[in-house]
Image (tube, rainbow, N blue to C red):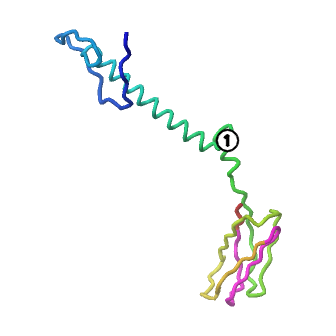
């Protein structure tokens, strides 16, 4: 007894054997057509499932679950407010202990076009904001790691 040759493809339908169909066996026989179509669908679904499992394994990056992986990727966020101090700079302290973070700044009032260039100097436990314009209003900061 031989096995049908499977092709991993989605079949549009499954042939219904009619009462008028002559009995015909073999790999291309009408009696085996529905079985072949179902086998093709099964091979196709198995191929898709394997691809999904492979992507999930890569996304987990060695973690036991996606939830564990996402928890490891969560960003730590610190935020607060301070005041621009021009070229003298305004230092803001934090407790991150490293310089691998991003600083987002948003002026809290209209700068009237007088903010100038803004430069941020990062340190392990503080960052300093410098602006070349005359604006001395408040800003909100957000640190993301």
The part of the chain drawn in magenta is 123-141
Is 143 located above or below residue 29 in the figure?
below
If the image is split into quadrants, where does the C terminus sit? bottom right
Question: Which residue lies at the image location 50% right of the left edge and 37% below the top edge?
Answer: 51
- Please tell me whether residue 45 belongs to the stretch shown in magenta: no
Q: Nearer the viewer, residue 74 or 10?
A: 10
Quarter of the figure with residue 143:
bottom right
Task: Answer left or right for 90 relative to 64.
Answer: right
Position in image of residue 103 (x %, y %): 70, 69
Task: Point out residue 114 in the picture as x, y percentages from the top left corner.
Answer: 63, 88
Q: Quadrant of residue 44?
A: top left
Choose top left, top right, bottom left or bottom right for residue 125.
bottom right
* For residue 40, side relative to residue 58 (left or right): left
Callout 1 secondary element:
loop
Q: Residue at x 37, y 9 (%)?
A: 1
Count of numbered tags: 1
Point out the residue furthest to the front here: 2
In the picture provided, is 118 more to the left or to the right than 53?
A: right
Residue 59 point in image, percent of width and height: 60, 44
Furthest-bottom residue in view?
134
Instruction: Tell which of 75 and 28 is nearer to you.
Output: 28
Neighbour class for label 1 at 10 Å: few (<14), some, many (≥20)? few
> Which residue is depicted at the point 74% across and 79% down?
129
Q: In this rendering, is residue 2 above or below 107?
A: above
Answer above or below: position of 56 versus 135.
above
Q: Is residue 135 magenta?
A: yes
Q: In the image, residue 78 lies at what x, y percent?
A: 74, 63
From the image, tell me which residue sits under label 1: 62
């Amino acid at each position: 007894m031989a096995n049908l040759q499977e092709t991993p493809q989605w079949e549009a339908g499954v042939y219904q054997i009619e009462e008028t169909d002559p009995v015909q066996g073999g790999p291309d026989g009408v009696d085996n057509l529905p079985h072949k179509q179902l086998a093709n669908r099964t091979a196709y679904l198995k191929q898709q499932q394997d691809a999904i499992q492979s992507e999930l394994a890569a996304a987990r990056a060695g973690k036991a679950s996606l939830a564990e992986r996402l928890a490891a990727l969560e960003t730590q966020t610190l935020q607060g407010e301070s005041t621009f101090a021009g070229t003298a700079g305004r230092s803001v302290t934090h407790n991150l202990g490293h310089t691998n973070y991003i600083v987002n700044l948003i002026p809290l009032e209209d700068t009237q076009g007088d903010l100038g260039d803004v430069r941020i100097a990062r340190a392990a436990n503080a960052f300093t904001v410098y602006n070349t314009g005359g604006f001395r209003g408040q800003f909100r900061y957000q640190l993301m790691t």
